[in-house]
Image (cartoon, coloured by chain):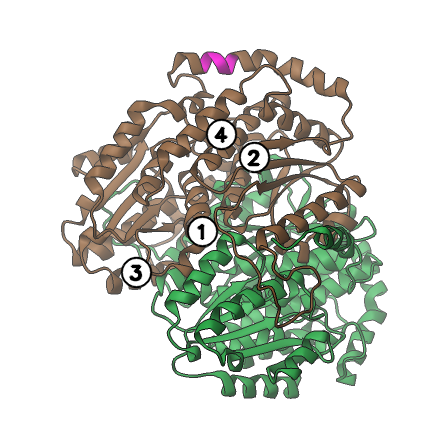
Chain colours: A green, B brown
């Protein structure tokens, strides 16, 4: 993975150095967390990439649940319980599912309580599933009490139980050790995976929350973790020039002080859109508090060149952009040497990867000319290891950014506000 | 469709009245455009909803292209050429495609030049398409010279021609009358649909750009247009209390003056996410210029309650929110009366629609308590007519907002900047 900061300008070296100095004790703290190998500290998600015990548990559970008939993994969770899984799955497989109708197993995500989607899901379960070993149901709730997740799980189980009375064999519950969900599952002899109590949802992608469904879907979780581990090394270096998470956290912080209240993540790979959505939660919940924080947005290249780029180039200068692309493409296609519709110059015979690279290069030149600050992140390609690197880079960056903003990176106090109001309303509703 | 503005507060009546007064001549102008029934004015997309000639042309082309074997419509276009189509298709059908593997025809969108996606597409075309009447290819470019669109079209045609030498019969080109693309298609006897020259991409959903692929997919375009027509009537009323587009344009304008530089569209129906993406272009290109404009964002309820809502409630107060939901659900599911995992109170036996409504109500109460301004838009349900209403409402709102901001709502001058840079790079690349 490459990082380029030359156009994150408007920052004087002195300010950058001061921030780096301020973070130096925190880097030491992160190193101590890593050395401890335990899960005492709020930062301890950083120990997941080389946790052999968790990896073993996940692979053992995969061994137990996987059959040759497996067609669908139902991933029932919301927010931190599914965004990391969806990020990796969509990047590698999900974005292409419509073009691969016969590739299995597929993951189907059930997150919110959309009546229309759930109705379609119930019909699908009734009609399309012929035997219970075609499905694995992974229900994920750290607290064990997430309204949407429990609702979806109940509906799915209620439907499948009518056809397959022993469907509970196909279920894996992922939750905190000792939660009410844990105890209920234990009482029913349902399989359970746990995540460390200190690891919050948005930092849990390398725990069983993400690893189990991804492993079931055929993703190499070892490579994913290998990428994360290597990036963790880089992102805890003391030297500014060697530590990409440090530089980009400082860039976001200083640009935010210069009234950039939006961090646009401009991703030149549509299959990484869900990685952007994972980052929205990571940034939104980690630093959006005390009246502070940047609003994370996701733009897709080249689609949004034909959509929001007019605004980005011509509108208010309120954004610090992160361009995300890849060095290599694992697949490519070339245009014919002779076009039947010769309406665009200089594209005949070219690979589409070359066209995309030319478009991105043109955009970056234009951003620089317009004095729009940006960070560049270039993944090697879209595969497990670089994705593992990227996710770990961003989680570490967010810890530094939270420290610079002097907020608690690991809580989300305001989320409780609407839950209280919703509970009041639900308590007064009679069953439908 | 219902509109509620009581919590778009912080606005004094006097300011609102002044804006309405300033827009009064423009309302008269829009009415004149409607009376003219022609396409001379930049606003003339407003004449599409009851253009009988266009409707006839589209239905005739559908008649010509539709066969019982049709399985896939390839919609090749980007930005204004596909976002409206995708908005409607995903809302009604596309969001559920993974749960309806055997429902046909499906639309497959080819927009950007993603090498991995195109490689998968070429493989899919080679393996899955058995006869030429299983596909219709609709290539859409207003100018006729969009790089990504021409590239994708060439690749798809090159692949299919090897199997089906007369595949050009299955193609419909949608472009401006007389464009180079029009002339090339004419020379090859390929079918053509045109859109009025004055109708820009982001206002073209009710032209053949959107109508043809949607009709092919089985969407009732008459109901879609009926909704648009009825909303056009409302949105050109003089009276502030009767004209929803006027009120919301004024709200966005005045809140923007109060330093809200983000317009978050918080949609409590995941299948409407692509409607949000369509709106991103509409707002981004229409008013993002001269250093002005708001950044449109899309949030999905209840997913983003578990993601960005911490930021929205606890972070900077820089957003004017539009809550988008429906009054009714055309499908619904109830939870069992007895839960197997009784971990959440007050949900047993409830319909999921009731749970979603309780969640949204809780969120709105919280926004009001936190003094976060919002507009509420409530569609009747997710079907053709209300979607037609919504799209027309938003297009008219944007015309008023552009007027209030004193920008040219219908151009996108800065988009040319990166195209020039990209062209320079492409011209110097040798074919791969």
Q: Residues within 10 Å of mark 4 (few under 14, many from 20)?
A: many
Q: Main secondary structure of the magenta part?
A: helix
- The mark lying in front, picked from 2 and 1, is 2
Please, which chain is the residue tagged with disc 3 on? B
Residue bearing the label numbered 3 = B122
Residue that label 4 marks: B392
Q: CA distance from mark 1 to mark 4?
A: 36 Å
Q: In the structure shown, which secondary structural element does the residue marked by tag 2 occupy?
A: helix
Question: What residue is shown at x 59% (from left), y 32% (from top)?
Answer: B2
Kindly check if marks 4 and 2 are in contact, taking CB atoms under 8 A apart as contact.
no
Q: State the residue position of label 2.
A: B283
Name the residue that disc number 1 marks: A358
User: Which of pointers 4 and 2 indicates the residue nearer the eye?
Assistant: 4
* Percent position of residue B53, x then y: 29, 23
Comparing marks 3 and 4, which lies closer to the viewer?
A: 4
Tell me which segment is drawn in magenta: B29-33
> Residue A429: x and y, percent?
69, 51
Q: Does label 2 lie on the same chain as label 4?
A: yes
């Amino acid at each position: 993975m490459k990082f380029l900061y030359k156009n994150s300008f408007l920052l004087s070296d002195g300010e950058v150095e001061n921030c780096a100095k301020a973070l130096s004790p925190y880097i030491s703290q992160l190193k101590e967390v890593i050395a401890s190998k335990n899960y005492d500290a709020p930062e301890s998600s950083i120990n997941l990439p080389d946790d052999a015990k968790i990896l073993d548990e996940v692979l053992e559970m995969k061994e137990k649940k996987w059959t040759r008939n497996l067609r669908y993994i139902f991933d029932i969770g919301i927010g931190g319980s599914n965004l990391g899984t969806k990020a990796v799955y969509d990047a590698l497989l999900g974005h292409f599912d419509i073009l691969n109708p016969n590739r299995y197993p597929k993951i189907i995500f059930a997150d919110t309580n959309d009546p229309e989607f759930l109705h379609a899901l119930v019909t699908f379960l009734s009609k399309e599933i012929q035997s219970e070993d075609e499905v694995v149901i992974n229900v994920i709730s750290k607290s064990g009490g997430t309204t949407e997740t429990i609702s979806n799980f109940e509906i799915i189980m209620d439907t499948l139980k009518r056809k397959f009375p022993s469907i509970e064999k196909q279920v894996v519950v992922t939750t905190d050790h000792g939660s009410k969900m844990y105890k209920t599952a234990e009482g029913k002899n349902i399989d359970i995976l746990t995540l460390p109590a200190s690891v919050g949802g948005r930092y849990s992608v390398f725990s069983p929350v993400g690893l189990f469904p991804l492993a079931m879907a055929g993703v190499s979780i070892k490579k994913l973790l290998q990428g994360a581990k290597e990036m963790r090394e880089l992102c805890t270096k003391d030297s500014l020039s060697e530590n990409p998470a440090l530089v980009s956290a400082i860039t976001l912080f200083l640009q935010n002080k210069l009234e950039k209240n939006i961090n646009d993540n401009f991703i030149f790979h549509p299959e990484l859109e869900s990685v952007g959505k994972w980052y929205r939660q990571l940034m939104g919940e980690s630093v959006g508090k005390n009246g502070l924080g940047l609003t994370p947005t996701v733009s897709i290249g080249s689609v949004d060149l034909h959509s929001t780029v007019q605004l980005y180039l011509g509108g208010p200068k309120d954004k610090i952009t992160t361009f995300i692309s890849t060095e290599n493409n694992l697949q490519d296609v070339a245009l014919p040497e002779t076009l039947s519709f010769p309406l665009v110059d200089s594209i005949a015979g070219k690979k589409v990867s070359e066209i995309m690279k030319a478009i991105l290069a043109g955009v970056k030149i234009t951003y620089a000319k317009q004095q729009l600050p940006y960070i560049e992140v270039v993944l090697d390609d879209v595969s497990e290891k670089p994705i593992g690197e990227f996710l770990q880079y961003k989680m570490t960056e967010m810890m530094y950014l939270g420290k610079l903003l002097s907020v608690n990176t690991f809580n989300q106090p305001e989320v409780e506000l609407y839950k209280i109001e919703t509970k009041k309303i639900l308590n007064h509703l009679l069953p439908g």
